[in-house]
Structures are given as C-alpha cells and as structure tokens.
Image (tube, helix red, strand yellow):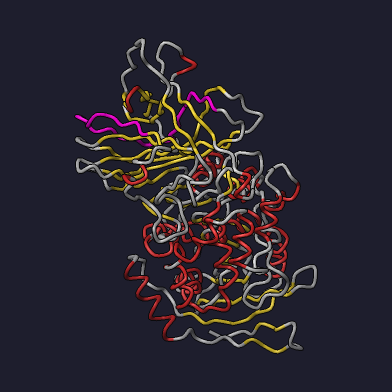
Amino acid sequence: MRQKSVMNLEAGGKAVTPRPPSPATVAFSKVLSRTWSLPRRRNQVMIERDVQVPMSDGTVLLADHYLPVAVAAAATVLVRCPYGRRGPFGVQNAQILAERGHHVLIQSCRGTFGSGGTFEPMRNEISDGHDTVAWLREQSWFDGRLATYGASYLGFVQWALAMDPPPELVAAIVHVGPHDFGRVAYRHGVFDLYNFLSWSDLIAHQESTGMLRGMVRTFTADRRLRPALDRLPVTAGARDLLGDHAKWLDRWFEHPQLTDPFWAPLQCGAALERIAVPVLLVGGWQDLFIEQTLEQYRLLAGRGVPARLIVGPWTHLDVASKAGPAVVESLAWLDRYAGTGRSPGTGRSPGTGEPGPENSVRVWVGGEGAGQWRDIGGWPPSGTGTQRWYLGARGALSAREPVAGPDIQPARFRYDPADPTPSPGGALLSMTAGMRDNRAVEQRPDVLVFSSEPLVEPVEVVGDVAVELSVTRDNPYADLFVRLCDVDPRGRSRNVCDGIVRLTEQDPLSATVRVSLFGAAHRFGPGHRLRLQVAGGAHPRFARNPGNGQVDAAAEDLVPTQYEIGLDPEAPESTSALLLPVAG
C-alpha cells in the first residue's frame, strides 16, 4: 500500500509520516483479542501521530489516524476522547478497530493531551465534533462513510454530534454514554457527589501522573477522596482536593436547576429524536448511566430507528476490562453497517442479504440459578406484569395485601445530615462499586428495612423497578434513597438496584412519592429474601441534603428530618409498595 502523508497545518506544511504501531501496542491488542474472543485481525495497521485538526474558532485539536493497510474503501470510525490517545485507550478504541478494516481517527478533546483550548467538560463537543467531520470531508482517505464509537465521555460526544447528524454518518456505537449530563450530575435533584468529584480528580491529574500512577490513584480513590467527601461545605472539600484544576465542579454546584441555560450545551436529548442511523447501545446494571442507556433504547426503538441494546453485569469501570461480549457485538455492528460492500440504507449485512438483529435486546440475568445472557424482544420486555410487594408492619415485605389491624403504625426514622447514612457499592466510579454486602448499613437506626419471608419459588425480575412510598416528613427539604437487595440464606444482603429523589417546598409534606430504581434483570432464588431499604441519603455517593433548602451548606447550618412511611392497608393513600416487573 502506498502510504500517504497528512499535512501538519501548524508546522509550515510538515508531513506526518505513517509508522507501524509499537510492539507493545501490537502485543496488548493480541492479548485483548484473545481475552475478549474477538474475530481475527484482517490487516496490518499504520499510524499517523499528532495530526492537527483545525476548529472553526482557530483552535487546533490533535488526533492520531490509524490506517488499515491494503484495505480498499474503508469507512472511518471517529473516536473523540479526553483521556489521551496512546496506551490502553489507543488500543481499545483505535488499534483493534483498524486491525479489522477501518480507518480510525482518535482525537483528543479540546484542552487535553496537546489539543488547544481549555477543557470545559461537555461544553464544546457539539461544535468541535462537527468541525472535525468538516475536516474529514477534505481528506483523501475518507470515503464518505462515518461511524462513531466509544464509552462514557466518548459516548456523550456521539450524542453531541447527533444533535445535527452529518449526512455521512452510517452507524453509532455508544457504550455506557449519557446524552444529558445535567440529569446525571443532578440525579432527580441530588448531586452525584462521589462520581463527579472522583472524575474531576482523574481529569485534573491525568496528564501529570502517567498511566501507572493513575492506576494507583484509581485503586486508592476511596481513601484519598474521603476527607474531601466528608467536609462541609462540599465545595470547600473539593477545592482542598483539586485546587484550581477543576473549576467546573464549582460551576455545577452554582447551577442546580436543570432548566438553567447553563446546562443547555450539555443536554443532547434532542439527538434521540434526530438520529436515524443504526445505533448499538451498551449498558451495565451497576453503571451510573443505566437510566439514560435504557431511555436511549426506548426512544430510538419507538421511532423505528434500527437499535440494539446490550446490558451486562458491569460497573462503569468494568466496561473497559470485562465487556468482551459488547466489543464482539460492536465489531459486528461496524461490519454490518460500515463494512466493505455495505450500501447505505439497505439495513442488511454485506454478503448475506440477511437483516441484522435490530430493535432487539440482550441482557445478563443475574442472581441465584441464573447467571446467563438472555435475548428479549425489547425494553421494557413484553410478557411481564407489575407485581406489588407491600411494605408492612414490623419490617414485612409481601406480595399479599396486608391485613388491616387497629395497631398498624407508620414506620419512622430520622435522617441527620451531620451523621449521613452510608451506602456501600452501587453505581460508583470506584473499585468498590457494584453488588456489595449491605448488612452493616441495615443495622443503622436511620435505615428502614423491609424483608420478605424466604422464597419457596423463585421470583425473576426483568424490567423497570419502582417504589411508591406514602411519606410524611417534618422538613420540606429532604431526600429519599431506596434500594432493593437480594438476601441469601446466609444472611448476606446484596444490592440489586436503587434510586434517589429530592423533595422540596414544592412537594406536599404528606404524599405518595414514586422513586424509580431504574432497570434490573435478576432472579431471587428459593430460600432467598427480597429486601427493601428506605433512607434519607446515601453518603458519600450522593451529596447529603443539608435540610435547609440549599444545595451546599456549612456544618452549623444542617437541619435533620423526621420521616414516617405509611403502612395502613385500610387507607390507600397510606400504603407503600415495591413495584416489580415479574414474568408470567
């Protein structure tokens, strides 16, 4: 293959010469391919490093171009990334794709790893993405077909581009990527503290620590971040940890209302109404973006856009190392819609004439006696009905309607933000994320626990989970955190899914409150018990509610809240129930 050069616009026309990848890159790619059981490599790869891509405002972003050697009419995969272009990111997001017949342009986002400008999370991705596509149109190796690929932030930039989908776009592959960052930062009104303090810490130090030290920082994050997470006001703790390296965190706290124009560039939900090309979506049951991943599929499939959803037993950090099945399907998706011989608009696999598995869902069903992949027709799945499990006196939880009695009193607890309720595991950017033993927190007086009797028959839950709680509180400013757990015969209580909601002066002091626990695919086996926790917070995952109407407050300004959860079956407005999607 005759190697072409790319002109370096800032260096007086200096050519960027393609070079083979390093032996370490090739070796790591082989290890990943074996570990993930990827299809065989089809071609060799050459790389043009530090290609300069001009933006319309004069800023220049750096990119690496991976060329598939001796492949004719190769589509281009665009990967836009704030985490660097070399090392594991380059292999996972570029090398393995280029080895299977695609041009890949992996670009560092504005203000990161040599790209010009200042990094302001998510704020410039719409315009920078479109400027990059405009540059691609001028490249001799671009054949007019564009696909997008990537996880997390690399998924958000795909939705940003899809706010005005380029005509060249033929496919998108979004792994654990949100489309509306405002709704992630403020999850139903509650700031997602641990995740975005830890993420800001990562971004603030990633270019000075190097890969190995960065890995050590990830493993020690819980201990390192704890002083900042525990300090009040929260913004003071964040400044102690980050200094002036992540000023965006202060701005997020200054704008708690998602209707504020501040959030508009970070809200790309309109892309779900505008994109029309096939989209592969990958989520994880313990991922912090699972709510939006499920929403993306529902909206796309509802519009008739070819879409496929895969949800595995992953946390957010797991996806980079354990989601081999998702990568296999991603490569197949690229082959189907951006492979050699693919004709735009046919919706068929090249060379087979068979339609792809569009508008289908593959989920991992966990729990006792399950642990398997299952293909279902859509999300929410058909064939399931909502089963009500009633919260009862003395911590009971039952699918039978409770029997009325003269002595049924509300369940009560008190939340004190000065001693915030902890919450282990869950959807964290942490090595301690995922399903964890909750027994210690369930012993606290500020956590209500409702448990079923040991199951005689299994209960399989596949779909959207929610709770309706009859709540009376003595403070208008309060949070409700609810978690569903699976208790095994040894008494270990492991979290399956959870949700949180913030109540304000606009909500009645006595009302039925619905809390979404998002989705789940889990089998509660015989001998196991279902358990529901109800609390006033989940520290330090979510920023504690000061109880005084503020988002952030000093320790001396905190106000506790007293809660009552209604359990009276004779008064429909005073009953509380767990709503489970149960098959059959």
Whether the magenta-drawn stretch holds residue 154 is answered as: no
- Residue 496 % position (x, y): 36, 43
| Picture quadrant of residue 329 | bottom left
Is residue 308 positioned above or below 326 on the image?
Answer: above
Is residue 576 positioned above or below 542 on the image?
Answer: above
| Picture quadrant of residue 59 | bottom right
**Residue range highlighted in magenta:** 449-473
Left or right? Give the position of 36 relative to 156: left
Which secondary structure is most common in the magenta stretch?
strand
| Picture quadrant of residue 391 | top left
- Residue 363 % position (x, y): 37, 46
Q: Residue at x 65, y 55 (%)?
A: 160
Left or right? Give the position of 8 relative to 331: right
Q: Residue at x 73, y 75 (%)?
A: 60
Q: Is residue 397 visible?
A: no
Nearest the viewer among 312 and 233 is 233
Left or right? Give the position of 368 relative to 114: left
Whether the magenta-drawn stretch holds residue 461 is answered as: yes
